[in-house]
Image: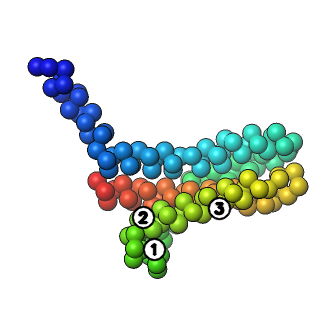
Amino acid sequence: MTALDHPWLAALKVYAHPRVVGMLFLGFSAGLPLLLVLGTLSFWLSEAGIARATIGHLSWVGLAYGFKFLWSPLVDRLTLPLLTKTLGKRRAWLLLSQVCIALALLGMANTDPVVNLTHTVFFALAVAFASATQDIALDAYRIEAV
């Protein structure tokens, strides 16, 4: 038996399949907004001189991930008129949520929490909600793809 015929190498070949590699990148991209909303936002606000109590209250933005089960049936059943016809239901929701995440991140990047904390909070909520929606669509896409 050569080194290339080893059973564990055959098992690792599964991870080289293009569909699995695609899922790996989708999973990675789904985790980034969560990191930005929960970790980086707190650091950014503390560097801006926002009070710790306010930063603590803003950590509640992450609850969108905990309550995503409330709107997951909507994402599962609702079709997006133009996008669903061209991409399919799961990919349409993925695209819409990723566009919303990008727009909300741009909004966050262009706000100053010292000048207008309300706008920063609004955009952080939008990122969290869109990212949780992306998680819902991605989980459904993974289930259907497998």
Q: Secondary structure at mark 3?
A: helix
In the picture, the disc for residue 103 is 3
Relative vertical location of residue 46 with respect to residue 106 in this rendering, above or below: above
In the picture, the quarter occupied by the N terminus is top left
N-term mark: 1 or 3: 1
> Which amino acid type corresponds to the residue marked 3 in the rendered image?
Leu
Task: Residue 111: name its quadrant.
Answer: bottom right
- Residue 23, given in percent of the width and then of the height, sits at 39, 49
The residue to which callout 2 is attached is 91
CA–CA distance in space, label 2 to label 3? 18 Å
Relative vertical location of residue 63 with respect to residue 9 in this rendering, above or below: below
Q: Secondary structure at mark 2?
A: helix
> Which amino acid type corresponds to the residue marked 2 in the rendered image?
Arg
Residue 85, visible in the rendered structure: yes
- Taking the image as shown, residue 66 lies to the left or right of residue 12, namely right
- Residue 41, given in percent of the width and then of the height, sits at 72, 45
Q: Tell me, yes or no, whether the two marked residues, 1 and 2, touch with CB atoms within 8 Å.
A: yes
- Residue 81, given in percent of the width and then of the height, sits at 46, 80
- Taking the image as shown, residue 36 lies to the left or right of residue 122, namely left
Q: Secondary structure at mark 1?
A: helix
The residue to which callout 1 is attached is 83
- Taking the image as shown, residue 132 lies to the left or right of residue 113, namely left
Scheme of image coloration: rainbow
N-term mark: 1 or 2: 1
Residue 125, visible in the rendered structure: no
Q: Tell me, yes or no, whether the two marked residues, 1 and 3, touch with CB atoms within 8 Å.
A: no
Q: Tell me, yes or no, whether the two marked residues, 2 and 3, touch with CB atoms within 8 Å.
A: no
